[in-house]
Image (tube, rainbow, N blue to C red):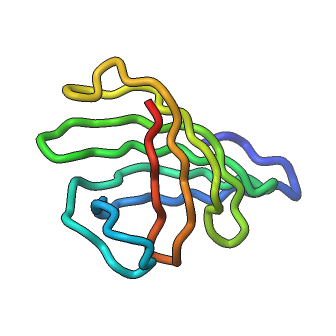
Amino acid sequence: MPSQKAGRSWKFHVMNEGLYEAVDADAWTQGARIGSLNGMAVQTAGGRSLVHVMRFSNDDTLVLAGSLTFEGKPTEGRLAVTGGTDRFEGCRGEALVEYRNPHKYTVTLRT
């Protein structure tokens, strides 16, 4: 773990959530499960930094990396699509992350 200077702190967040198809604009409705989100976020004193690994069915993976602003929760922003395996092999682009409620984010892939 990196050393810390006085007055600076980091928070680590581990993510293990289901991924579901979008149904409609209703923030509380979820569609069919399409995989899981497994990843880690490191929140700095400046309130930034996030890295994700998404795993879909059949063990296909899509790797997202980048930073989002934290204001008690991750807010909207963009992450880079840095690669993947199986059907996502060689994938590049960006993922737009939108906050819907404390238990739901919309992730739109542009590859």
- The quadrant the C terminus occupies is top left
The front one of 5 and 107 is 107
Q: Is residue 25 left or right of residue 54?
A: right
The front one of 29 and 7 is 29
Q: Residue at x 54, y 47 (%)?
A: 96
The residue furthest top is 90
> x%, y% of residue 7?
88, 58
The front one of 12 and 84 is 84
The relative height of residue 85 versus residue 108 in the rendered view (above or below) is: above
The residue furthest left is 58
The residue furthest front is 24
Residue 25 image-quadrant placement? bottom left
> x%, y% of residue 54?
35, 45
Q: Residue at x 47, y 32 (%)?
A: 81
Q: Is residue 104 left or right of residue 98?
A: left
Total residue callouts: 0
Q: Residue at x 52, y 60 (%)?
A: 13
Residue 37 image-quadrant placement? bottom left
Q: Residue at x 63, y 58 (%)?
A: 76
Q: Is residue 101 left or right of residue 88?
A: right
> x%, y% of residue 79?
57, 40
> x%, y% of residue 42?
60, 51
The relative height of residue 52 versus residue 63 in the rendered view (above or below) is: below
- The quadrant the N terminus occupies is top right
